[in-house]
Image (cartoon, rainbow, N blue to C red):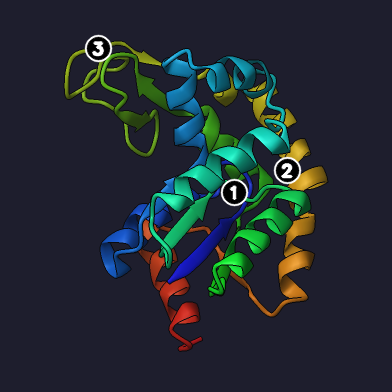
């Protein structure tokens, strides 16, 4: 199965992709994770992407498209996947379509998570990441046992630059301007599945599965 997950930052795409992987087995491919790994590794891609990410801007299409194309090729000639964070522009969507058309394989579903703006800001601004092991927490919904200290390794919990409120607002504006038009692109192709992204993660998962299984 080939699925694209759409939704603004903080909508829960990564969480749902992991739960869906456990349910249906398709690999979870996160553009954000790939980019952050490149930044941490000081690769040429990471250096090029870092400034855009810190400002809450989209990394240029050619960089992201090349990275995703390379990653999808690793999945073989008939890949299954859940794409989280790609495509983010119509240009990227067209590049993905060309990749799939060239292999004569269809995209099955585009799941678009719908979450109110205030809730997105609350979710993102409260996230904390361990500077040593990368474990994720949230100051209200999933706090560490000792504030500011990782439960796993004892490392310091940090707020990522792109999770500060001023950057969050910039990221959401970029999403509205550049990524939201993807909904129209995929709706015209009969692939769009709009899902209420509020509530618990298991509740959202069941809404998604009901839509892609044809039960709702």
Asked if labels 2 and 3 touch by Cβ distance under 8 angstroms, the answer is: no
Distance from disc 3 to disc 1, alpha carbons, whole Å, reads 31 Å
Q: Quadrant of the N terminus?
A: bottom left
Residue 182 in view, yes or no: yes
Of the pair 182 and 120, the residue shown nearer to us: 182
Q: N-terminal of the two: label 3 or label 2?
A: 3
Residue 159 in view, yes or no: no
Of the pair 175 and 107, the residue shown nearer to us: 107
Distance from disc 1 to disc 2, alpha carbons, whole Å, reads 12 Å
Residue 179 as seen in the image, left or right of residue 157: right
Residue visible at 48% across and 88% down?
A: 214
Residue 158 in the image: state x and y as whole percent.
41, 15
Residue 185 in the image: state x and y as whole percent.
77, 66
Residue 172 in the image: state x and y as whole percent.
71, 38
Q: Label 3, on which residue?
A: 155
Dot 2 alpha-carbon crowd within 10 angstroms: few under 14, some 14 to 19, many 20 or more: many
Residue visible at 43% across and 60% down?
A: 81
* Residue 80: quarter of image: bottom left
Asked if labels 1 and 3 touch by Cβ distance under 8 angstroms, the answer is: no
Q: Secondary structure at mark 1?
A: loop
Of the pair 177 and 123, the residue shown nearer to us: 177
Q: Label 1, on which residue?
A: 86
The vertical placement of 162 against 29, above or below, is: above
Q: Secondary structure at mark 3?
A: loop
Dot 1 alpha-carbon crowd within 10 angstroms: few under 14, some 14 to 19, many 20 or more: many
Dot 3 alpha-carbon crowd within 10 angstroms: few under 14, some 14 to 19, many 20 or more: some
Residue 142 in the image: state x and y as whole percent.
32, 36
Residue visible at 39% across and 72% down?
A: 206
Of the pair 137 and 83, the residue shown nearer to us: 83
Q: Label 2, on which residue?
A: 175
Q: N-terminal of the two: label 3 or label 1?
A: 1
Residue 41 as seen in the image, left or right of residue 63: left
């Amino acid at each position: 199965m080939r699925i694209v997950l759409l939704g603004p930052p903080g909508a829960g795409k990564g969480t749902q992709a992991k739960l869906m992987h456990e349910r249906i087995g398709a690999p979870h491919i996160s553009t954000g994770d790939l980019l952050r790994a490149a930044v941490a590794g000081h690769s040429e891609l990471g250096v090029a992407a870092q400034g855009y990410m810190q400002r809450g801007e989209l990394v240029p299409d050619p960089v992201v498209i090349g990275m995703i194309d390379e990653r999808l090729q690793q999945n073989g000639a008939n890949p299954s996947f859940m794409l989280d964070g790609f495509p983010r522009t119509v240009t990227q969507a067209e590049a993905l379509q060309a990749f799939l058309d060239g292999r004569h394989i269809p995209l099955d579903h585009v799941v678009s998570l719908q979450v109110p703006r205030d809730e997105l800001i609350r979710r993102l601004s409260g996230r904390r990441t361990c500077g040593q092991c990368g474990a994720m927490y949230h100051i209200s919904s999933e706090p560490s046992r000792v504030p500011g200290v990782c439960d796993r390794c004892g490392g310091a919990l940090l707020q990522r630059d792109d999770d500060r409120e001023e950057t969050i607002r910039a990221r959401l504006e970029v999403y509205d301007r550049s990524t939201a038009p993807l909904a129209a692109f995929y709706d015209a192709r009969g692939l769009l599945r709009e899902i209420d992204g509020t509530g618990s993660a298991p509740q959202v998962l069941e809404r998604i599965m009901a839509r892609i299984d044809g039960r709702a």
